[in-house]
Amino acid sequence: GDSVTQMEGPVTLSEEAFLTINCTYTATGYPSLFWYVQYPGEGLQLLLKATKADDKGSNKGFEATYRKETTSFHLEKGSVQVSDSAVYFCALWDSNYQLIWGAGTKLIIKP
Amino acid sequence: DVKVTQSSRYLVKRTGEKVFLECVQDMDHENMFWYRQDPGLGLRLIYFSYDVKMKEKGDIPEGYSVSREKKERFSLILESASTNQTSMYLCASSSGTGRRETQYFGPGTRLLVL
């Protein structure tokens, strides 16, 4: 079945560092891809999404490009802040109209 | 803004108790979902509902049931709580019949079963 694999965390960076969180997927067809973020003590919220190959989703300085050839949707940010500390989840819609989730990557930004 | 609320942030129950987790959304969404979140496992779908009085099993329905008597409210029921049901429970809702719409999440209920 469809699946999502994320890099294991925690990922610890200093403020203003460049961030990459890897996400690869296995799916039939052409799923829509998502990054959700969970800040401490809060529910998940959509960060960005892409619905077809080569689409780039972006929000709050984060970007991710839907790469069909490498089945990837890596999350990037040029300069992270302490406030970006959170757990990040990659997800896709499968052919049964359900969201398939990665395990989550905890990001810790140190001042 | 869409708001999804859950009845409790933290809950402590004893093995064998019947547990009710309530979720309410205020945006007239058709679709509602219950997930559990465990470290290293991401989110796993327990049950979902696309309409009032309608329910469908997700990936891990065993030991759980749900109720949707009103469009805005979706309840998760643990008939006889067990220690392996200690987890974070997340409710979500989404609009539309396409089933690919953005899901909006509540803050979660952290359940401890002793």
Image (cartoon, helix red, strand yellow):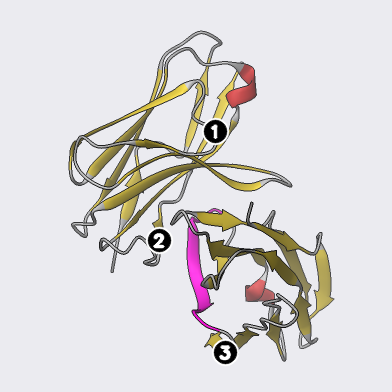
Mark 2: secondary structure: loop
Within 10 Å of disc 1 (Cα), the crowding (few <14, some 14-19, many 20+) is few
Q: Is residue B76 left or right of residue A47?
A: left
Mark 1 belongs to which amino acid?
Ile
Give the chain letter at badge 2: B
Residue occupying the point 64% across, 22% down? B84
Within 10 Å of disc 3 (Cα), the crowding (few <14, some 14-19, many 20+) is some
Mark 2 belongs to which amino acid?
Gln
Q: Between marks 1 and 2, how big is the CA–CA gap?
A: 19 Å
The answer to which of A45 and A4 lies nearer the viewer is: A4
- Residue B39, horizontal then vertical, whole percent: 71, 44
Question: Which residue has dot 1 on it?
Answer: B60
Question: Which residue has dot 3 on it?
Answer: A56
What range of the chain is rendered magenta?
A: A41-52
The answer to which of B47 and B107 lies nearer the viewer is: B47
Q: Between marks 3 and 1, how big is the CA–CA gap?
A: 33 Å
Circles 1 and 2 in contact, beta carbons < 8 Å: no
Question: Which residue has dot 2 on it?
Answer: B103
